[in-house]
Image (cartoon, rainbow, N blue to C red):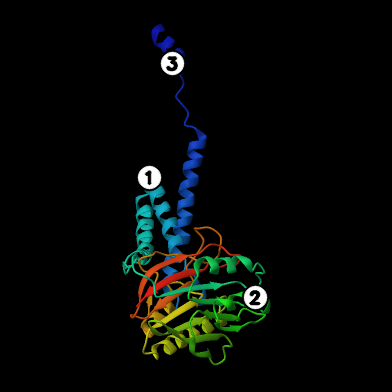
Amino acid sequence: MSTTELEHLNTSPPPAARPTWRRILRGGLVAGAMVALVLAGFATIGGFLGRDHWRLELLGHFRVQYFWMLAAASATLLLARRWLSGTVAGLLALVNLSLVAPLYFGSDELSGATPELKLLSLNVHFLNRDFQPTLDLIADEQPDVILLMEITPDWAEALKPLNAIYPHAHVMPSHRTDGMALFSRYPLAKLEVERCPGINLPTLIAEIDLPGGPVTVVGTHPASPGSAGLFEARNIQLAMVADWVAERAGPVVLIGDLNTTSWSPYFGDLISASGLRDTRYGYGVEPTWPWFPLPLRIPIDHCLVSPHFGVVSRHVGPRVGSDHRPIIVELVY
């Protein structure tokens, strides 16, 4: 070897070492994406098996969250050239998107119409003692009909000022979560309190004399499906409510904390058997529980209407001290 070659070897810089932190970051992102793929992928598929087990039905309520997890996982894995796993994650993300996206379409396009019925539905939470935000919300929104759930004796006392504006009311306080209250500006021509056999949870069925004609408002709050027994009780109540609604010939509105989302097979049964439609179409997911910010909230508070109605507007209200956020819906015949 010549002297010149030796000098070149001695003076040439050493090969650049690949930064360790980049390898660690890339490996961590890929590993995290694979974990997201496995968990959200299993939940995506399991959510379709909700009739087989109550825990699987619970998985079906988080379609929005699965979509974002799988979309992020797909992008990460494809950038890392993990073609197969990235493609699988992308396809599963599209499965969830296909269930969520329809809620953003199908609006009645009546935003300029004058509402004939404005409703507010809120689960106040029976442990909540901050009454004033709810009263302020009602004063701001000025609905025609109000359904409040989990009303305790203290709540019933705090709500008495509403009687001046809503002289037609039916209040059923309870120390547990089955308390309910219905307030209306217009006369209650008829009011029934229905209970499913063996399930001591009330459903209010009120015929309200509106200026445009009588409307039946059904308010219900089935059990939260936190166990096999409560899961069964919720499904029985939803089925019976659907039957009660189907018996009504005129305009019907169903509101309340139904403790299920639009993606549950039992919610689909409710829609099919009752003949009602979800007012959420055209307005998006509009999640209401729990109160804290997205992306963890899911839509379990609902307003369903018979074909007699068009939806002028629909929105989720602010936090008022409960673990739920209220929904406010404006309707026109």
Left or right: residue 83 versus residue 239 is: left
Q: Which residue lies furthest to the top in this view?
A: 3
Residue in the picture at 37% in, 52% down: 86
Question: Of 2 and 214, which appears nearest the observer?
Answer: 214
Task: State the SS at label 3.
Answer: loop
Specify whether residue 222 is in view. no
Q: Which amino acid does label 2 sit on?
A: Trp
Q: Is mark 2 on a helix, strand or loop?
A: helix
Q: Quadrant of residue 284?
A: bottom left
Mark 3 lies on residue: 12
Residue 58 seen in the figure: yes
The residue at which mark 1 appears reads as: 79
| In the foreground, 148 or 168 | 168
* Image x and y of residue 315, in percent: 44, 65
Crowding near the residue tagged with mark 2, few <14, some 14–19, many ≥20 C-alpha atoms within 10 Å? many
Q: Quadrant of the N terminus?
A: top left
